[in-house]
Image: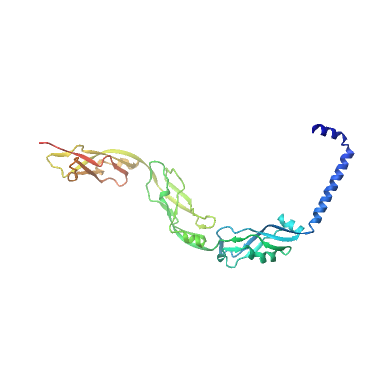
Amino acid sequence: MLNKIKAILPSLTPERIKNIRVISLCVLAAATFWFLNALNDSYSTTFRYPIEFAYDKDKYIAISEPPTDVQINLSGLGWNLFRNNLGIKTTPVTIRLDNPTEVKKLPGSSLLGTITDQLPDFDVNFVLTDTLVLNIDKRASKRYALKVDSSSIQLSENYWVTSSIAYTPDSITLHGPASLLDKMESPLLVKVPQDEIDENFNEEIPIEIENNRLISRNPPTMSIAFSVEEYLEVTKDIPISPVNFPPDSSAYLQSPTITLKYKVSASKEPDIVLSNFKVKADLKLMNPKDSLTSLQLLSFPSFIRDVKLEKDSAKVVFNER
């Protein structure tokens, strides 16, 4: 192939090159003339033509996007077909809906007259699109109470919320499709999106709801504030108070104390004393088979958490005489 090209190149004199250019231009001009002349003929073709639905958008809202085109077969001059195929000066066909909430399905064949009236440059032969599906609802407004979803608050390990959760506003007005608003229950729960919280919280949080694209919120945010504090794990040996034990010590507890674990905020830990706790063992509750009596935690400070006795029973020992 390379040898053939090398053999041809010497024969391409400037005059021959000029002749080739002239011939090429003639061929191009002839093809253009043929194409432009062909556009003056009539043709039939099928393509997708844009449509738009006209209804009172102040009163109604589309839950799902309505169809934007239909497939039609039409006849017309090549020029007009070519222009529309390129999208040049193509005006969508307007389909008017007087009662949009009542129209769920629109047969394509029912649009033939509407399309024909709005495309005077063409003969519309038929509509190929079988059915247009619509989902349009009335616009509505509804007020809902708001509440913080406390279960959504994610704290760092060993941190706890130590105050009430303050928030404002306590209600919201939603605007959107009536059917969607009717499905929503009051109060609406607002989640706290932040995680690993380890300091007092005071943030403006977006009020997230389903179908945000269709539903507008007033106001769109909520201010949430609460205090958090780190809790320490503490272990203490608490004295057990014997109940209904004989005064002569003929029966007594094998161990006079029980280990207790709890969590307390660092600021409150110094305030705790042993007298804050009361654990009792009642001899009348002893199981004679194993000499174990249950332990009852009667009192402890209200500000501590996760209070657990190491054991739920204590061994009773009897003196033999």
Q: Residue at x 60, y 61 (%)?
A: 132
Q: Is residue 75 visible?
A: yes
Q: Is residue 73 above or below residue 16?
A: below
Quadrant location, the C terminus: top left
Q: Quadrant of residue 263?
A: top left
Residue 237 in the image, given as x and y percentages of width and height: 26, 38
Q: Is residue 57 visible?
A: no
Q: Is residue 277 above or below residue 97?
A: above
Q: Is residue 1 left or right of residue 91?
A: right
Residue 43 in the image, given as x and y percentages of width and height: 75, 59
Residue 308 in the image, given as x and y percentages of width and height: 29, 42
Q: Is residue 250 left or right of residue 27?
A: left
Q: Nearer the viewer, residue 77 or 236?
A: 77
Q: Nearer the viewer, residue 132 or 145?
A: 132
Q: Is residue 188 left or right of residue 103?
A: left
Q: Quadrant of residue 318?
A: top left
Q: Nearer the viewer, residue 125 or 311?
A: 125
Q: Residue at x 43, y 47 (%)?
A: 201
Quadrant location, the N terminus: top right
Q: Nearer the viewer, residue 82 or 220?
A: 82
> In the image as oriented, which residue stretches furthest toward the left?
321
All told, the count of numbered labels is 0
Residue 18 in the image, given as x and y percentages of width and height: 88, 41
Here the colouring is rainbow
